Amino acid sequence: MKSSDIVVVGGGVIGCAVAYYAAKRGLQVTLIDQPKRGRATSASAGGLWPLGESIGLGCGVIFYKAQLAKGIVPEGADGPAQLPRSFLDFAMQSNAMFPTLTEELRETGGLDIELERTSLLYLIYDEADEAFARPLWRNCPCGRSLSEWLTPEELARAEPAVTRNVRGALRFNGDDQVNPYRLADAYRAAARALGAELLPYTEVTNVRVEKGRVVAVETAAQRIRCDVVVNAAGAWAPQIARMVGIDLPVQPVRGQIIGTETLPDVLSSCLSTTDCYLAQKRHGEIIIGSTTEEVGFDVGVTRSGIKTLAAGAIRALPFLKQVNVKRVWAGLRPGTPDELPVLGPIESVTGYYNACGHFRTGILNSPLTGLLLAELLSGAPLSFPIEPFLLSRLAPMVPVERLSNHPPQPNRSHAVANGEPS
Amino acid sequence: MTRSPLVIIGGGPAGMAAAIEAARAGLSCALIDEAPGFGGQIYRQIPEAFSVRDASALGKDYRRGEALRAELREHSERVTILPHTTVLGLSPDREIVWAREETAGVIRADQLILATGAHERSVPFPGWTLPGVMTAGGAQRLIKTMQVRPGRRAVVAGTGPLPLVVANQLRTVGTEVVAVLEAGRHPWWPRFLVRAWGEWSILKDAFDYWLGLRRAGIPLRFNHTVFQARGNSSVEAVTYGPIDPATWSPIRERAQQVEVDLVVVGFGLVPNVELTQLAGCDHRYVHEVGGWVPVRTPQMETTVSGVFAAGDGAGVRGALVAIAEGRIAGITAAERAGLLSQAEAHRRRAPFIARLKALLRVRAVLDEMSRLRPGLDELATPETIICRCEEVALAEVEAAIEQGARDLQAVKLFTRLGMGSCQGGNCAPAIGPYICRATGRTPEQVGRINPRLPVKPVTLGALAGMAEIGDGAGDPRGAISGELVP
Amino acid sequence: METVNGSWRFHRAFDRGTPIEIVVDGQQVPAFAGETVAAALLAAGRRELRRTSRRSAPRGLYCGIGVCFDCVMTVDGRPNVRTCQIEVRPGMRVESQTGDGRWQMTP
């Protein structure tokens, strides 16, 4: 029988990051991966937007507007929900790891993750947008240094292709982007270079627990003896968790995304609006995202989803009207009730660790997640407190206190305007 | 019209034949095609601005196409034709998203016949991206519908009947054909003659092509193929030579080089199955008919009730088979709609089912001769571009496999192969079998690049303005007249 | 069959449409109504239609039926137009493009 110190289940960006950081600490790692349609890593835009995501930009503000359009307003809310300080701090620290990580991964595995310093611009179309943006700017959780208010003239100079029908923009410096698939590939290549073993196209059929301890992971072909299993199975993480007898409140949340034909350099920043976000990637295509829909494991794309995103993109960048869509696809974000990841050990089973529930920020939070898990597994002091992210926080399902005192969103179903089941 | 009893997608031989039979039985239908006219690739009409001077010079395929178009015209009161209309996608409940220039909308079909045809299979070899390397179908279209010579001096390479046909066409328009290279073996062997007996037209066609080359002194070399195209900004020379008769591996030591400005390649066709995939039909991999094809009943129905598939899009077997299949599908759709009794539908289908049986006997032998052998993989070197759009070289695909990629999707994410404008239409059918051989996995395991709405290019503007069913707008007839052109 | 000496066009089964002119990279090029841009360019002796973005490699007409996107050029200011699929119009401006071409992007 084969044996390994650690088995990581799931070969998306999180599983690959855990494998990389664990291998880097000299741990013996086996990474088991069964590619699934709709894995979130391959449907990500690759935005690293710690500030934007924490204050509800990106998908958050799109979702909020769509809810408003349907008459669903979270009580007392005057904008999209903000995430707690612990999330922001985690995300900022993870984001800060990217420059070094880029070099490390290039040296170790030979792949470039295409880190680009873009910043994120929130476009302010109307009064409501402005009312939302003003307090963000005044009370930016990271202080004024990272945010910047642009007048329409300044915006036109900075981003000439952006619509002139705009009151200005709020810029977040430090919110950048990478190539999400490349990031996963680079972690995996580097992990392998450091001795991690990869079992691709392998489905985990069971996690064996004896006397409250993980003893092995089983696949159709073999049993791998191990002391530790890391559940990094994304939207499919509850299936792995059930093998050790726990319920994981992770739900697939579909996001549809449009990729345009490749274009010359148009955008120097990533854009976030109440309709969509836009990011031009190194190869020239502009990625337009994203819907937020609870439709189970359905990875189809819908007419209404595409239509809403297309209209939103044209509103922000009018010349896109004549640009061809190259591809539309969808991914399943691993959503949690409080939108925070689920990390670390659980009480009932020794040797089982969560590294899942990253919702929309798996790419951004992969380095710190990988590092923390590696530290936990090797008994090293932790670079970031794990408590806010333990599964136990969700165990009795109490509403989690939020920075802005907004209650959690009551209803996450059918998110896009005119949302339809596919 | 945002609802139709029957929508037929693809106005080639199969689609036209389906529309004719459905209409003949009293079933109204809409016939959609991207092109301005109907006929598909093989029976393509000349542009509207051109006028026929000598119909006899347009060739046999044009006459066959004209005959079908004339038959279709007799039923024009029941056939709504929608030329210049692209189908972007459809759903298993038969809602079809269409686009024409900057407008898009949705039609719901009670029944659906997919007659989407096929496109040419790419076989990458060094230099195949140079201007002057052209597919057989592309060269043929220039000659037949544009009256433009694709080159002055050519080598034609590939397998099956199309390269022979094109070589003859090139010859008649004054292009010097240096050699015709057939990868397969000599067809004049007893099994072929026995099977083809009774299908005089096919035998005669084959003989005519052969005779045409022979009279012009053009060598037809069996078990030979192109090795490399050379040139700076376009083709200046080509290297070709013999291949192993069993494996088709190139025998490079016997290669020769000739100066040409045109290399025509025709290694068979690949069915366009994006729409049958989106419709949710089951598919299987049948190497001999081009790869992935929808599973069908003898009445041409797919595994999704009310969705039929006919012609090359359901397995490449040529125009004559496509017509028979289209007619069978059209009759069955009318039967389903309650316009034909079971007995009458059976009676109407019978001659076409018999015709299919006879044609498929011959076809099976041709398919066996032209079945691509794995040795063709060896033509590409590590530097050879596999994905023309994203300029991905074979070495990059090999690196992805070395990094653990075992299916098309993983290779795509790793290399960007198939992420370009053609959406993998060109490279996936070539690289899929390569990945199978490199990893020892089956076509099912290596999978496909999954199609999504929109399967054809469309602007964001058109999508943003897409009219939904019941919007009161979005009639695909728009400004189009109901006349078949010309 | 007639062929015009030295010309890529031949005359056989049909007559072309009205003679027109298009402008290719600033030069007048004769064409006939009904022809595709790719056919008119080939008839003008032009093989290379564009250069790729990654390797700056020459590309021309390959599949000829709208599948491969190799024959794309900038037509009337719009890059990436498949020249095998679009018919010539009088005065049409056609430009070769390198990589992704140049777009009119400012609103």
Image (spheres, rainbow, N blue to C red):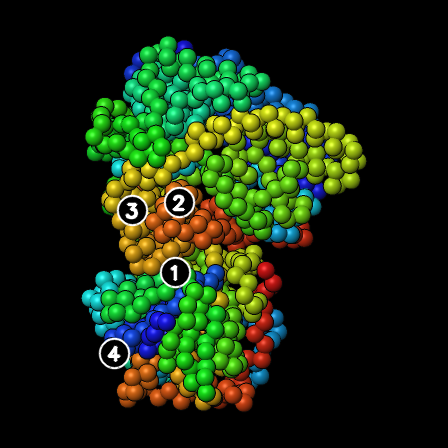
Q: Please tell me whether mark 4 sits on a helix, a strand or a loop.
A: loop
Q: Indicate which label's residue lies in the foreground, 4 or 1.
A: 4
The image quarter containing residue A136 is bottom left
Amino acid at the residue labelled 3:
Leu
The Cα atoms of the two marked residues, 2 and 3, are separated by 13 Å
Horizontal side, residue A233 vs residue B308: left or right: left
Residue found 36% across the figure and 52% down from its top: B439
Q: Which residue is mark 1?
A: A162
Q: Please tell me whether mark 2 sits on a helix, a strand or a loop.
A: helix
Mark 4 chain: A
The Cα atoms of the two marked residues, 1 and 3, are separated by 39 Å
Q: Indicate which label's residue lies in the foreground, 4 or 3.
A: 4
The Cα atoms of the two marked residues, 2 and 1, are separated by 45 Å
The Cα atoms of the two marked residues, 4 and 3, are separated by 35 Å
Dots 4, 3 in contact, CB < 8 A: no
Residue found 31% across the figure and 20% down from its top: B179
Residue found 71% across the figure and 42% down from its top: B5
Q: Indicate which label's residue lies in the foreground, 2 or 3.
A: 2
Q: Indicate which label's residue lies in the foreground, 2 or 1.
A: 2
Dots 2, 1 in contact, CB < 8 A: no
The C terminus of chain B - image quarter: top right
Q: Indicate which label's residue lies in the foreground, 1 or 3.
A: 3
Horizontal side, residue B110 vs residue B186: left or right: right
Which is nearer the eye, A324 or C21? A324
Q: Are marks 4 and 1 on the same chain?
A: yes
Q: Please tell me whether mark 1 sits on a helix, a strand or a loop.
A: loop
The Cα atoms of the two marked residues, 4 and 1, are separated by 46 Å
**Residue B393: % across, % down:** 28, 47
Q: Which residue is mark 2?
A: B433
Q: Which residue is mark 3?
A: B394
